[in-house]
Image (tube, rainbow, N blue to C red):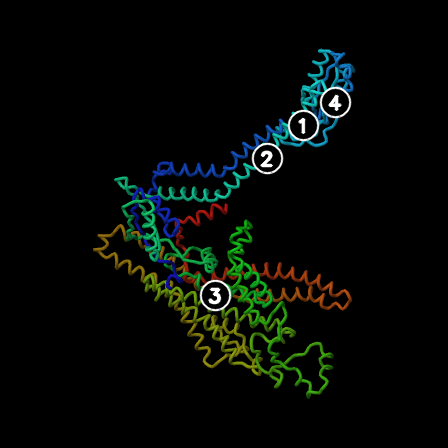
């Protein structure tokens, strides 16, 4: 149970792994995720370590796996390119058969000099192409053209292009050469075309047959490619995981030393003492998997090095531990604030955010994330904002639950009070007997004051929370100001006293009695003498004055200021009790006496202890050691800074807790303004279309409530609660100057790589 409130006990262990079993043993330790390997080769270059070649092979395999689909795609793309080239040519040749080329050449058997050239050209070049033919050939050619309706894919670029098919008739070799050169200049593709109709029909049948064969081959290739890629996709993640595990194992093996016999690897690891049995069992499993007959050995080592800090968490406590770790990683075996933060953080948030309605909405949103967490984890969203909210789902859940509680105490639900138990105030006795017409009195008086000193007006306190009648009172803000300001001071002082009390457990655990007598005791006495006394005055005033004497109650703020200034000549602010001046003077003197105790006495005692340790004999034996262990000037300056920071911090930190009062009032006022300026408009409508207007206004009200009061105000209260824990609470006992335990774990390695 002690590990819940402070970090795990760690030990430095030495592992002796047989060469043939080292890989399997490290693999088992990676699956366990409970050991942090130390680098035993810090002076050896990365490229000169034993397993650098294995690491390179793993990186090469990782690179090939990331490009695995590319070879298939390249082959398929090349095949597709060749197919479309053939298909383009065949389709063009087929289009020639659509021309009635027999009509202009009916005399072909008798006129052997009539020749023609056929081909395909880009559609936009046709006008220029036609003019060039006419000018160069001087009108001695006959051109016919037709547009190809469907766009064709360029086999080189893959772009869609529009083309036209043409045929040119001419006579003589000289015109033939001119026509071909013009076609080449305009990048027209020329195709052979039979001269007789029978040959053209045979060519058409052949082209259609080739198109069908190529289409069949293309379909079969596509199906085969899909099957291969689907089969590869099923095992792709498994291959990635195996390769990256191998790479991580060889990286870890490079941290080990190799003994002189070259048959054993020596490793040093930090590990929790409570997990030593699990680590031994993992080593045994790795040895059995490798088939080695020599068992691996684990020896605990004695060391003066500071171990890393390790706090075990689960899905519920991890969010609160992250809040603490964001301030700083705790020192080894230092008190862990996270268990206390589970309660204090959502509670202080709720003090600033207290509203039953808003708390209920926040609770429902967090419950949705908690109930569907397994499904949402499996989806692995890339939205950083959603992932941040999802990781803090349990924090949000507790903040919502505590906000409902504080909303009940404030009796505030969307800026409205709930009269669940009946008000403790009664106005009927003020206006005569029961049958009197006191409604006229209410109608003719804009402002009426309920006097608690009048019998029958105040029937007693509200059973739970604030009486709902304060929601309609003109002095509502004055009353809530006083109530929430005193409550903030009380909560702040108790929170800080709790933090100072936790420092005692650190001093006891680390066996530092000097810090107890000259550190903890003066600190707790100083705070109790001043601010603890202020809290007692608040409670005393609440109990000593009732409805009849409350008007004569003195101001506690003036009392506290006069107490610190030794000013007791103010006759306008009478004493709360007899003997108050003597008690307050004594408390201030005690608080002032604590300052030199922390500032001077502790420094002198530390110096005296150092001089005692460095007596004549010890000074000769350990001169170089002790001379570097104590510097009186540094110790004096450090102690002065700590003392001044603590004493002034008690004042500033107490004032800092007034943010609980300020943000609570701000949240309540924003909620009230939103209700009166938005929702009240829809409720006050009496027209026939009021229902539709109310629907629109309610949608706007709900949107503004979520955007402003839940998100913006919630984030503001969250940040202020975070500051109160980091600055006002944790600095009383938590130094946060340690370093985190980072175990060798496949789960964290793969999670980080796949998240990238």
Using the rendered view, name the quadrant where residue 424 is placed: bottom right
Real-space CA distance between mark 2 and mark 3, rounded to the nearest whole angstrom: 65 Å
Sequence-wise, the earlier of marks 4 and 3 is 4
Sequence-wise, the earlier of marks 1 and 4 is 1
Residue 436 at x, y percent in the picture: 71, 86
Return the residue at label 4.
128
> In the figure, is residue 747 to the left or right of 511?
right
**Point 76% across, 64% down: residue:** 689
Return the residue at label 2.
219
Q: Give the secondary structure at mark 4.
A: helix
**Point 47% across, 75% down: residue:** 536
In this rendering, does residue 376 appear at all?
Answer: yes
Return the residue at label 1.
91
Q: Give the secondary structure at mark 1.
A: helix
Toward the viewer: 581 or 311? 311
Whether pointer 4 and pointer 3 mark residues with C-beta atoms closer than 8 Å, the reply is: no
- Crowdedness near tag 1: few (<14), some (14–19) or many (≥20) residues, C-alpha within 10 Å: some
């Amino acid at each position: 149970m002690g590990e819940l409130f402070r970090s795990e006990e760690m030990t430095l262990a030495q592992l002796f792994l047989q060469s043939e079993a080292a890989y399997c043993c490290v693999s088992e330790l990676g699956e366990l995720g409970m050991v942090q390997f130390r680098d035993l080769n810090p002076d050896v270059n990365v490229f000169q370590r034993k397993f650098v070649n294995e690491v390179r092979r793993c990186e090469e395999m990782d690179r090939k796996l990331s490009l695995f689909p590319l070879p298939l795609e390249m082959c398929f793309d090349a095949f597709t390119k060749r197919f479309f080239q053939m298909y383009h040519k065949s389709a063009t040749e087929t289009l020639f058969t659509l021309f009635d080329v027999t009509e202009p050449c009916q005399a072909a058997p008798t006129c052997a000099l009539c020749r023609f050239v056929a081909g395909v050209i880009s559609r936009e070049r046709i006008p220029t192409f036609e003019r060039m033919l006419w000018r160069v050939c001087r009108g001695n050619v006959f051109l016919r053209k037709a547009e190809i309706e469907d766009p064709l894919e360029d086999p080189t670029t893959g772009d869609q292009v529009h083309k036209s098919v043409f045929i040119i008739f001419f006579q003589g070799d000289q015109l033939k050469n001119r026509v071909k050169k013009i076609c080449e200049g305009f990048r027209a593709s020329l195709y052979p075309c039979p001269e007789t109709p029978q040959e053209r029909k045979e060519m058409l049948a052949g082209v259609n047959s080739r198109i069908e064969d190529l289409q069949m081959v293309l379909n079969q290739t596509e199906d085969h490619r899909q099957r291969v890629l689907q089969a590869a996709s099923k095992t792709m993640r498994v291959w990635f995981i195996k390769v990256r595990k191998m790479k991580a194992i060889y990286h870890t093996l490079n941290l080990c030393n190799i003994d002189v016999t070259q048959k054993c690897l020596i490793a040093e690891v930090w590990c929790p003492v409570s997990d030593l049995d699990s680590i031994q069992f993992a080593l045994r499993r790795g040895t059995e998997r490798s088939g080695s007959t020599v068992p691996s050995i684990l020896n605990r080592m004695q060391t003066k090095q500071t171990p890393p800090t390790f706090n075990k968490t689960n899905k519920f406590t991890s969010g609160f531990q992250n809040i603490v770790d964001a301030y700083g990683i705790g020192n080894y075996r230092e008190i862990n604030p996270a268990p206390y933060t589970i309660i204090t953080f959502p509670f202080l948030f709720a003090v600033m955010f207290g509203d039953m309605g808003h708390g209920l909405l926040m609770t429902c949103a967090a419950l949705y994330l908690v109930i569907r967490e397994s499904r949402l984890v499996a989806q692995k969203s890339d939205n950083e904002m959603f992932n941040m909210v999802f990781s803090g789902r349990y924090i949000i859940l507790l903040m919502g639950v505590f906000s409902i509680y504080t909303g009940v105490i404030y009796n505030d639900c969307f800026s409205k009070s709930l009269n669940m138990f009946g008000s403790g105030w009664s106005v009927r006795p003020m206006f005569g007997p029961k049958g009197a017409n006191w409604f006229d009195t209410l109608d003719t008086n804009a402002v009426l004051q309920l006097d608690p000193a009048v019998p029958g007006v105040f029937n007693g306190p509200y059973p739970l929370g604030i009486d709902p009648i304060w929601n309609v009172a003109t002095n509502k803000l004055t009353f809530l100001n006083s109530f929430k300001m005193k409550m903030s001071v009380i909560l702040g002082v108790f929170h800080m006293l709790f933090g100072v009390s936790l420092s005692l457990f650190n001093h006891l655990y680390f066996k530092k009695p000097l810090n107890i007598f000259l550190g903890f005791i003066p600190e707790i006495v100083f705070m109790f003498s001043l601010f603890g006394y202020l809290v007692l005055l608040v409670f005393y005033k609440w109990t000593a004055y009732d409805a009849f004497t409350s008007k004569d109650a003195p101001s506690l703020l003036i009392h506290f200021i006069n107490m610190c200034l030794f000013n007791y000549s103010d006759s306008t602010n009478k004493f709360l009790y007899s003997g108050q001046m003597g008690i307050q003077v004594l408390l201030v003197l005690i608080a002032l006496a604590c300052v030199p105790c922390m500032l001077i006495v502790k420094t002198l005692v530390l110096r005296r202890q150092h001089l005692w340790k460095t007596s004549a004999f010890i000074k000769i034996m350990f001169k170089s050691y002790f001379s570097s262990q104590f510097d009186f000037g540094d110790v004096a300056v450090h102690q002065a800074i700590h003392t001044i920071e603590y004493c002034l911090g008690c004042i500033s930190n107490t004032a800092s807790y007034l943010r609980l009062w300020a943000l609570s009032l701000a949240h309540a006022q924003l909620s009230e303004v939103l209700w009166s300026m938005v929702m009240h408009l829809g409720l006050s409508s009496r027209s026939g279309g009021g229902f539709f207007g109310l629907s629109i206004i309610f949608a706007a009200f709900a949107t503004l409530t979520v955007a402003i009061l839940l998100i913006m105000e919630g984030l503001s209260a969250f940040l202020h609660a975070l500051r109160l824990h980091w600055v006002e609470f944790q600095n009383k006992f938590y130094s946060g100057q340690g370093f985190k335990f980072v175990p060798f774990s496949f789960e964290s390695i793969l999670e980080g790589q796949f998240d990238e």
